[in-house]
Image (cartoon, rainbow, N blue to C red):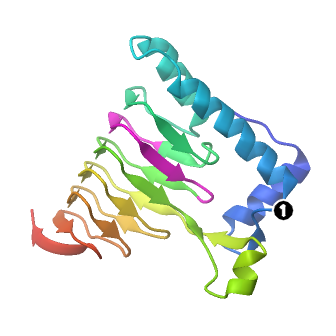
Amino acid sequence: MRHFTPQQQAELDKMMSGNPYDATGNTLLLDILQETQEMCRDYNNIRPSRHDEKTSLIKRILGKTGERIKVIQPFFCDYGFNIEVGEDFFANTNMVILDEAKVIFGNHVFIGPNCSFYTPCHPLDVETRNKGIEWSLPITVGDNVWFGGNVTVCPGVKIGSGSVIGAGSVVTHDIPAGVVAAGNPCKVIKNI
């Protein structure tokens, strides 16, 4: 479990509240981002055959995990401690999670290569955006969900248990349980 100073924790709470905050000029948050980048770099440089070493470090990076977890290198995230994964979690190569808000995966989630999960939101107004202001919305994925390769999940999305998200999809809104959904934007194609 990572520990933060009271000042860092106050900024993290502000970031995770869904309210606007300064993402680029806040040295307290930038220090945590750098620490996580260092851990991700270390993880990505472990020899693939060193399973126990990889598992130990990914469990340190992530906020909560099941016992059985496999994340194929390379893997990148912003904070790590905002990511929770259930039992039998598998992520293929090049997974990216921008976890300014919580990103929660249920049990038996299978993620194809090159998938991305983004919680930060940026203002449409260019002046505000150029000041580094952003806010974040959580992502929640139920049990037994399968993501094909090259899927992007946008801020605030919930995906129900037992669903399949087709390769190349851009998920911009909630997807119910027990469906196949695909496309850009991702839409329900059929019930399972």
What residue is drawn where x is 62% and y is 43%? Answer: 81
The image quadrant where one finds the N terminus is top right
* Residue furthest bottom in the image: 125
* Residue designated by label 1: 25
Q: Is residue 89 magenta?
A: yes
Please indicate whether residue 32 sits to the left or right of residue 88 in the image: right
Residue 17 vs 83, above or below: the answer is below
- Determine whether the residue tagged by mark 1 lies in a helix, strand or loop: loop
Range of residues picked out in magenta = 85-101
Residue 78 vs 49, above or below: the answer is below
Characterize the local packing of mark 1: few (<14), some (14-19) or many (20 or more) Cα atoms within 10 angstroms: few
What residue is drawn where x is 60% and y is 49%? Answer: 82
Where residue 9 sits in the image (x, y, percent)?
81, 51
The foreground one among 89 and 37 is 37
Asked which quadrant contains residue 63, the reply is top right
Residue 143 vs 40, above or below: the answer is below
The foreground one among 150 and 165 is 150
Which residue type does callout 1 highlight?
Answer: Gly
